[in-house]
Amino acid sequence: MKKTIIIIFLVAILIFSSIVMVIGSKENNRYDNRDIKTEKKENVDLDKPQDNEEDENINLEEAQLTEESLMRIDSQNGIDVAVVFNNLLEDDKDYIVFKVMVNNHRVDLENIKYAELSKLRVSDGTVIDEGFQWKLEGGGGHHISGYLKLPKTYDGNDVINDNVDNIQLEIEGIGDARKLTFKWDKDVIDSYNNGGR
């Protein structure tokens, strides 16, 4: 039963994402043909190492960090929540950003104060339960998405630094759900510390 709920939730997310991408691509594909420029092709020796090969390898590693690979899911008592550690996908110099998607058929989700229900546990023992900000992105009623943001510094120190092995976001009090937990381990933290900010 839990697998069925998760599959339905992921299908709903994929459908919602597809709709957003189609709408966005229609907006972004409007252009004036006069702006199209052609470039002169140059011959490239494929056996000779190119100047940008190292950069391409770095980009290949970054390409492996997708929304799906950074998504964590928890479901309790009919409340399905997926959270993406968004900083590795979109740069934000001031905030740690989590993209939150909530789905249920029990409670109205729009007026919940997610910032007040959230807590971040860091492997170095730091627990942050204040300073969160919530911005509703889309949806309404029983299906919403938005961004939960937290300043990157707490008590004058970086929340996520080289000494951190993992972070765990907790959201407690959505409907009948107990504490929903979303954890990112060392591999993700290392990517963040190595420039994914």
Image: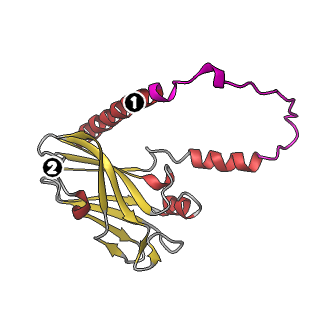
42 displayed left or right of 83: right
- Judging by the rendered image, the residue that carries numbered circle 1 is 18
161 displayed left or right of 125: right
User: What kind of secondary structure does the magenta stretch mostly adopt?
Assistant: loop
**Residue 107, can we see it?**
yes
Under mark 1, the amino acid is Ser
- Does residue 35 belong to the magenta stretch? yes
With respect to residue 128, does 113 lie above or below? above
Q: Position of residue 34 (x, y in %)?
A: 65, 21
- Please tell me how crowded label 2 is: few (under 14), some (14-19), or many (20+) other residues with Cα within 10 Å: few
Q: Position of residue 70 (x, y in %)?
A: 44, 50
With respect to residue 190, does 139 lie above or below? above
Q: Which of these two is toward me, 19 or 29?
A: 29
With respect to residue 16, does 95 lie above or below? below
Image point 37% across, 76% down: which residue?
126
- Judging by the rendered image, the residue that carries numbered circle 2 is 77
Q: Position of residue 66 (x, y in %)?
A: 49, 45
Q: Magenta region: which residues?
A: 26-52
Q: CA distance from mark 2 to mark 1?
A: 28 Å
